[in-house]
Image (spheres, rainbow, N blue to C red):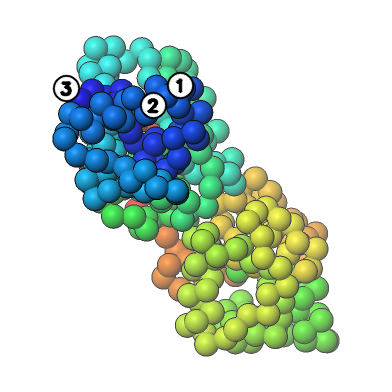
Amino acid sequence: MMNFLNLEYFLVAAEELNFTKAAKRLYISQQSLSNHISNMEKEFGIILFNRTSPLTLTYAGQVLKERAREMLDLRDETYREIRDIKDFSTGQLSIGVSHTRGRVILPEILPYYQDLYPGIELKLVEGNSKELAADLLHGDIDLVIDLLPLSVENVETVPICKEEILLVVPDQVLETAFPGRLDEIRRRLSKSVDLSLLENCPFVLLKKGNRVRTIADEIFTEAQITPKIALETENIETVMALSRRGMGITFYPKMFMSEEIPSDQQREAFLKKSRLNLYSLDYDRAHGVLGIGYHKSHYISRATKEFIRIAKEKIHYSP
């Protein structure tokens, strides 16, 4: 009878399409792996691999590869559910978040969470919106913290706080683009942010794949302009640091300003010292909601449910 160990061995071999590499991943001998595969083929009465170079899957092997993933995922979810029912003293929670957003959000949640549930092992997966959506879809993380709506299907979301993406415009950029007209241009932008006015100015932007960059590109398209991109980076902290030094205009989540401007009273002094101008954008998707997403088809552990409860309590979402 087929067992989970055979399925695990087969799945690794099907992923690697190389028995030598698969055996190394599994820490077993190549002969042992070949024996497991041969036993499965005898059990089914069908060939799973074409012994060619390179190795390929037969049609039956392709079907079993998909089913093996489903069965092993179901096994893992069943074990997690049983452990939850038996005892919530141990477990694991995998959280997906961008490293910058995590720096702002997680200190509000995790210390309290860990005090309540010290036996829960916390795992942090950092990446951009596109990477985290893929991790959530494939079950590599239990939940993701990102702007809503999430770009992945079959996901339940819980809003936790409002978020806004601001346009950051350094004085130095305006002085170069509009000599002697700094005050005039700042007044015009304060009344209405017209990106066509800034078409010839340099921009420093996140690389494609990040949600902030996606929204920025949509704004450029709506304004019918092609931005002059001075630099692209994966790191939003780098984007802001370069903008502060006058390298270009950028887009920056208001939430991240809380560390640099702890209170409204310090805002004016900070902006004056940095020679930065912050503008709200007349674009719906620049005004959003930060939320937690989890996959509807996966088992939602108590550890996940408790994280969501504490996040709602600590972050204080107000619609």
Looking at the picture, does residue 86 appear above or below residue 7? above
What number is the disc on residue 33?
2
Q: Do the numbered discs 2 and 1 sit on residues whose CB atoms are within 8 Å?
A: yes
Which part of the image, by quadrant, shows the N terminus? top left
Q: Do the numbered discs 1 and 3 sit on residues whose CB atoms are within 8 Å?
A: no
Observer-side mark, 2 or 3, equals 2
Q: Nearer the viewer, residue 226 or 138?
A: 138
Comes first in the chain, label 1 or label 3: 3
Residue 72 in sight in this render: yes
Q: Which residue is mark 3?
A: 1
What number is the disc on residue 4?
none
* C-alpha separation, residue under disc 2 versus residue under disc 1: 7 Å
Residue 280: horizontal and vertical position, in percent? 54, 69
Q: Amino acid at mark 2?
A: Leu
* C-alpha separation, residue under disc 1 versus residue under disc 3: 21 Å
Comes first in the chain, label 2 or label 3: 3
Q: Judging from the image, what secondary structure is the residue with disc 1 in?
A: loop
- Is residue 142 found left or right of 75 in the rendered image? right
Residue 277 in sight in this render: no
Q: Residues within 10 Å of mark 3 (few under 14, many from 20)?
A: few
Location of residue 285 (image quadrant): bottom left
* C-alpha separation, residue under disc 2 versus residue under disc 3: 17 Å
Comes first in the chain, label 2 or label 1: 1
Residue 203: horizontal and vertical position, in percent? 68, 73
Residue at 34%, 55% in the rendered image:
152
Q: Nearer the viewer, residue 217 or 148?
A: 217
What number is the disc on residue 28?
1
Residue 110: horizontal and vertical position, in percent? 49, 28
Looking at the picture, does residue 182 appear above or below residue 301? below
Q: Judging from the image, what secondary structure is the residue with disc 3 in?
A: loop
Q: Amino acid at mark 1?
A: Ile
